[in-house]
Amino acid sequence: MLEEKNDNLDQHQVDADGNGTETILNATTATPDDLSELTQPEAVLIEADATTATDAIAASNAEESEDETLKERHEIPMKDYDALALEELIEELKGFVSSDKALAYKDHIEEIKKAFLAKYNHLVEEKKEEFLAENQDPTEEFEYHSPLKSQFDKLYSQFREVKNAHFKSLQTNLKNNLENRLAIVEELKELINPQANIKDTLKHFNDLRERWNNAGAIPKDKYNHVWNNYHFHVENFYDYLHLDREARDLDFKHNLELKQKIVARVEELVLEKDVNKAFRELQDLHKIWKEDIGPVSREHRDAIWNQFSDLTKKMHDKREVLFENQRAVELANLENKKAIIAQIEVLATEKVNAHSQWLGQIEKVEALRTAFFAAGKVPSEVNEETWSAFKNAVRNFNSFKNSFYKDIKKDQNDNLAKKTALVAKAKALQESTDFAATTPIMKQIQEEWKEIGHVPRKYSDKIWKEFREACNHYFEHLKEHKKEENSEEVAAFEGKKTYLESLREFQLTGDHKTDLDAIKLHIENWKGFGKVPFARRHIEGKFNKILDALFEKLSLSKKDTDMMRFANRMDQLSESNDSRKLDSEKIFIMRKIDEVQNEIFQLENNIQFFANTRNAKKENSIVLEVRKNIAIHKESLDVWKEKLKQLKNIKIEE
């Protein structure tokens, strides 16, 4: 009876044919063919370089045999994801996750994750530094939310769910497959039975080989051990069972022909220009050699394996040269990135004292950041160190910049305190009737306001509005006081009052042109009366209400009606000779133009967003509504621009 293979045998213990069984178990990188043929322990000492090459291939094949998705990962070249922007990384991730082969892209997805989180965390750090520089309130907490981060988290969660389900199923299958293969090996051990019928034994042997080929993947850490055990007992079946030698020799011959074809193909692969592609095929050939092809006769085992092993070493050497060239490129990239970091470090020490100069410095750093990300990969062992140095350089620059703006912030807060005091003073005087004493003080307050610099942006509009209203309130009272005794204005008021009563009786004829001419004549007549006292200017509002009613009945376009009303109001302002009100009106209109333009810009951006969606070819109701709003806003913009044009043509008498 053949002695069973036992992991506990002494290293130098040999079986009946002189095969070192313990040596066979340990030489996991050799093929089953040459392992069973070894007659001395030292015969397994394969040349170191060849062993390195076969070790690498054996380890890779063991891993891929466990999970076949690994094999597909090598088909897509790895990009330099560090060079991509956050938006581009999201698009790359979306493409991989949405594929039905997402697991095959695991390495790409993990590299994208690494690049995205590194850049995003760096961005958050910068935003936090800016926040701390601008906000002095210790109770206000920093918060930063990005739609890009939400997109990334959602996509990566989808991938993680697929991955977890896959590996859960994989682990169960691997365990079951391993048990099946071990059971097959045990049955192989029992085949050597002199009392058994040879035909039944051969049939059982062929059934076991068929079951073995269909048994499925097993854990990678068991791969070589289990396969070598299997081949050991298969070879022993051939070598120790001397029955049906003719069938055995035919099988040996067939296996030798297959292995010779593999050797011939590897000889071609050694000449292949695409080294990575050739090496991948070599891995597949090693797997076929080990898993699909049976043993050959003893006289050919060493020779055919040595041929295959030597060619494998040549291919491995070519691949090492390729890696050395890639490393040379990575080292050049490293020097480039070090130079970029050094430039940023210099900018973090150059002191500038003006906002415009800092804008230039910021632009330089942004250009260097872009260059850093585009510089390509560096050696993996210094990647973290290089990234850390880059982050520190940018952080130091931002801290240096923020210290400048922090000083500006202090100056602006001082200016805010000064202007707040002037607002309080103006409000205290706005109801004063001692015009002779108060007017010079109010003018002085206005001059002081002009001398004070900028305040923080979030307070600028509010404090200016308060100051302007207080000043305007006082000076309007002053004008009212000056005009109160003006007899001509009183007469104008009486005339307008009488005319207003008669105008109430005016009826439209129904003829558009006749009615429009009549309304224009009423406007001209009204203007002819002249100015009224400031305190009695309410009569202008009454006149405007009557005009509004007539315009509505006349059914003019909204634009024409609006422009006629505006022209009438501007004539009234012109008559008042109040330059401040005209300036205020001009500022108001300019702001309205800006608001409408910004609204149009936002709506057009929304249209662009919908145009980029998958359903862009078929515009939905939302898109149509947005287009309608754009048209309305553009018509409004034309009206405001026409008003500004008319306003600029008004001249105030000195």
Image: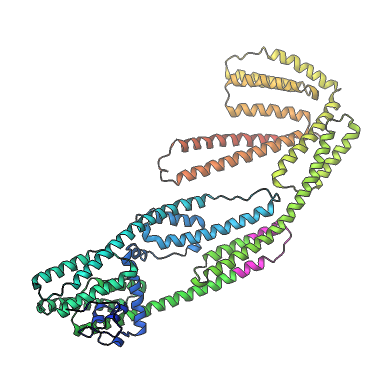
Q: Quadrant of residue 424?
A: top right
Q: Is residue 619 above or below residue 212?
A: above
Of residues 286 and 573, the one drawn nearer to the viewer in this rendering = 286
Instruction: Tell me what residue is drawn at x 66 percent, y 58 percent.
Output: 359
Instruction: Tell me what residue is drawn at x 47 percent, y 57 percent.
Output: 89
Q: Position of residue 39 (x, y in %)?
A: 25, 87
Q: Is residue 346 visible?
A: yes
Magenta highlight on residue 21: no
Of residues 99 and 202, the one drawn nearer to the viewer in this rendering = 202
**Residue furthest to the right:** 437
Quarter of the image with the C terminus is top right
Q: Position of residue 465 (x, y in %)?
A: 74, 38
Magenta residue span:
341-362
Q: Is residue 44 above or below residue 366?
A: below
Q: Position of residue 119 (x, y in %)?
A: 54, 59
Of residues 585 and 139, the one drawn nearer to the viewer in this rendering = 139
